Image: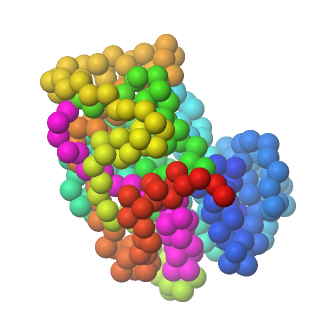
Amino acid sequence: MRALITGASGFVGFNLAKYLLTKGVEVIGLGRRQANFDFPYISCNLQSLDKEQFRSFMPVDVIFHCAAKVGFSGSWKDFYLTNVLATKRLLELAEEARVKYFIYTSSPSVVFNGQAIINGDENLPYASNPKSYYAQSKIQAEQLVLASNLKSIILRPHLIFGPGDTNLIPSIKRALKEGKIFRFTEKKVFSDFCYIEDCVEAHWLAFQYLMSSSSRAPRVFFITQGDPFCIWDFIETIAKFCSTKLKKLVVPEWLIKTVGYFSEIKMKLGISSFGLTGTLVEHLLYDHFFCIERATKILGFKPKFCVKEALKLTFKPIA
């Protein structure tokens, strides 16, 4: 078996590449950064990938499209180019090359409208009011995958973390250090999280399912630890591991939402690169966790760790 992984220099893509190699799968990695790995890796721009270059990677049995621009800051153009246009180009080239399988790494943010979600399943509609450019671009990319002729699966892992995490935990650590996050509510707000080891296992199981299934209908799956965890406890645990504290300043919801609104404007104008945005405030105010029954039943996905165990593994000293 031969796999092409986009975003192979990123957190999910790199860990997926290492995992597939242990399964005897030949890996080719694509990414934006220059890097040297133990597998063939090409630095390239996906949205302008030309046919000849793509053909040089062939044949491959499966494409794992993990590349994405994530976060709350940045222009719509940046998110559109990286998350939408690149996906469109990759699908076109994959169809032309008759790639058998396509697995897209998406996000539960595509269904978040700024209201609580309790055990949400895959029947939830797309958000009518996407809460970020990231979510908006992921919706459009998912729709492209669903409309393609490829035998495909869309995975929606939520808040991926683990050793080597380049996004979630570093962002929390930075916010704690700079005093840009504090506990502003007494509410216990529960969220889903996804440990990297289980995340890549889900990608492997999706590939196994595509190979064994006769159906060509695209499927969507939420991927989490199946262990809703208080998001404030998650942040406080990280603070303890980093020998710092999460400050507490309880304020009315209307006030913190106002702070988030103006913070988001500053980020969109390029005045600030990080802050307690309106979108982040809503994620910290409302429960949002999802049911993984479909992934368990169809893919055989069974997370190995609870969130508390996964956090300990994340901060375990390297021997």
Residue 195 belongs to the span the image colors magenta? yes
Question: In the rendered view of the protein, which quadrant contains the C terminus?
Answer: bottom right
User: Which of 180/28 is in front?
Assistant: 180
Q: Is residue 54 above or below residue 34?
A: below
Image coords of residue 44 (percent x, y): 76, 45
Residue 317 in the figure: left or right of residue 190: right
Image coords of residue 175 (percent x, y): 44, 29
User: Which of 90/113 is in front?
Assistant: 113
User: Which of 181/214 is in front?
Assistant: 181
Q: Quadrant of residue 263?
A: top left
Residue 230 belongs to the span the image colors magenta? no
Count of numbered tags: 0
Q: Is residue 126 above or below residue 199?
A: above
User: Which of 74/95 is in front?
Assistant: 74
Residue 190 in the figure: left or right of residue 279: left
Image coords of residue 30 (percent x, y): 73, 53
Residues shaded magenta: 185-209
Name which residue lies at 38% across and 45% down.
237
Question: In the rendered view of the protein, which quadrant contains the N terminus?
Answer: bottom right
Name which residue lies at 65% across and 69% down.
19
Name which residue lies at 49% across and 66% down.
198
